[in-house]
Every structure is written in C-alpha cells, then in structure tokens.
Image (cartoon, grey):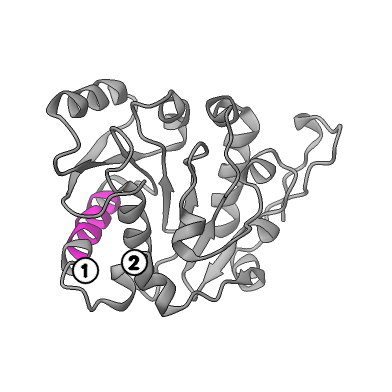
Amino acid sequence: MAKAKQAGQSDSDLKLVKGAAGDIWAGLTGARISTQQLNRSKVISAMRKDPSHVAIDMLRTRLLQAMQEHGWRRVGITSATKGCGKTFVASNLAVAMARGESRRVVLIDMDLRNPGLAQVFGVPSPPRLRDYLGGYQLAEEYFLKVGQNLVLGLNSTIESGASELLLETMTAEVLAEMCSLFRPDVVIYDLPPALDHDDVIAFLPQLDGVLLVVGGGETTADEVREVERMLGDTVPLIGVVLNKGEGGG
C-alpha cells in the first residue's frame, strides 16, 4: 500500500509500495447509495427503467470497444463549457461499465473548481481530493466502493488553484500508483469544462483519450473545433456525445 506523506516531508521522501489489487478492493469502505438517490440524480443506468438507458449502454459498448482496440484505460469526460451534462454522462457510463462481472471501474471527480459527483451519489462530506493527490492520504482512506466493481474518488472542496495541482509531479505519481494498486479495467475522470480554464490542458498527460459532451442548444460548432485544437496530437478525441436533455456539470 502507499504511505501517506507527512507534513514537511518532501515528495522524494515518499516511498510508494505496491500492494495486491484484491486486498485493496476488499478493504475499501463501502458506500450505501439508495435507489431514491440514484433516481434523483438521474443515474438512469443503475435501474435501467428509463428508456434513455439504452443510449448509455450503446455509448458504453462503443467506448469499451475503442478502448480495448487501442489498449486505452484512462478516459476523461469533458465539455466545452459548463451545463452540458458531462457529469451526467460520466456517472452513468461508470455505472453501466461496472455492471460487467469481470470489469472494474474507477470514477474520479477531477472537476476541482466545481465538483459534482459527491452530490450525484449522495455522499455529503467526502475526503478532499487535494489531500489524496498530494500524498497525504492513503488510497484505502480516500476511495469508496459501490458494489463489487465500482470505486468512487469524490470531492466537495473547491480548489481555486486547480491547474497548479493537476500539474504537480506528485499528482501524476499518485494516480499512477492508484492504477497499480487497483488494476482497474477503466478509469473515468469527470473533467472540468475544457474552455473555462487551463485545467484540462494540465491534465492531458494523465489521459489516454477524451470524450466530449456537447449540450443540445448549448455548444457551438466553433467551441467543438476549439476543443479539438486544444487536444491537438496530445490526446485523441474518442468521440463527441450529444446530450439533449440533462444539464449540470
């Protein structure tokens, strides 16, 4: 397991010790999330009663096929601007993917200026993501497990210096260690809107691909092209998802 960094300890002093994947999954705190909470938050892929869940399932399958074809594991979900429903897509995709018996999924709220996943899943006071990314908190203390195959990395603390935190070497090391510890099949990052700040640019080295959510009536063609230019050759744009109804995030 990773050792948490103590106050005053430099990054070079932090020794990361890799543990068994099965051990850390079994030892995580379980989150009890009610059906009512999921319904309120429109996590339609959980109950699968809303006809719209079919579109989520189709997106899940196509995304998984693309990721398997290219050997990708880490996908970021963003939008050009706020209010397009990226958090809706991220949460529903994660739940849909985790239904596979042998597929383990990690979902992390990386929208540090406007975190929303804790509210979606009804977790009122999650640990600070900054503490985990800074090496001050162990993975088994930070993450929550939902069912057998989904792990949540939540946050409710707004970080004004988000891009600086995402650029830190320790952030990259902690996330690499997370992948080594959990050995997930898929890691989904709910990212900030791409055009609001430089946060997404700062985080691109930690991604294998990006999914862009566009809001019906919200996102312009120029904004989509601007996001494409931003990604450039650094990280592939896996696809563009039109969200017609669900805003927020």
Per the rendering, the mark at residue 53 is: 1
For residue 242, side relative to residue 6 (left or right):
left
Q: Which residues are magenta?
A: 57-68
The percent coordinates of residue 142 (x first, y second) are: 65, 56
For residue 8, side relative to residue 170 (left or right):
right
Residue at 35% x, 72% y: name it.
39
What secondary structure is the stretch in magenta mostly built from?
A: helix
In this picture, is 61 found above or below 136?
A: below
Q: Are marks 1 and 2 in contact (CB under 8 Å)?
A: no
Query: Is residue 173 found inside the magenta-colored segment of the image?
Result: no
- What element does badge 1 sit on? helix
Q: Nearer the viewer, residue 216 or 91?
A: 216
Determine if residue 183 is in view. Answer: no
Q: Nearer the viewer, residue 233 or 41?
A: 41
For residue 211, side relative to residue 152 (left or right):
left
The percent coordinates of residue 187 (x first, y second) are: 43, 52
- Are there few (<14), some (14-19), or many (20+) residues within 10 Å of tag 2? many
Q: Which callout, 1 or 2, points at the residue further toward the start of the chain?
A: 2
In this picture, is 246 found above or below 163?
A: below
Q: Nearer the viewer, residue 211 or 11?
A: 211
The percent coordinates of residue 241 (x first, y second) are: 19, 46
Determine if residue 242 is in view. Answer: yes
- What element does badge 2 sit on? loop
Per the rendering, the mark at residue 43 is: 2
Which amino acid type is marked by label 2? Val
For residue 226, side relative to residue 189 (left or right):
left
Q: Nearer the viewer, residue 238 or 86?
A: 86
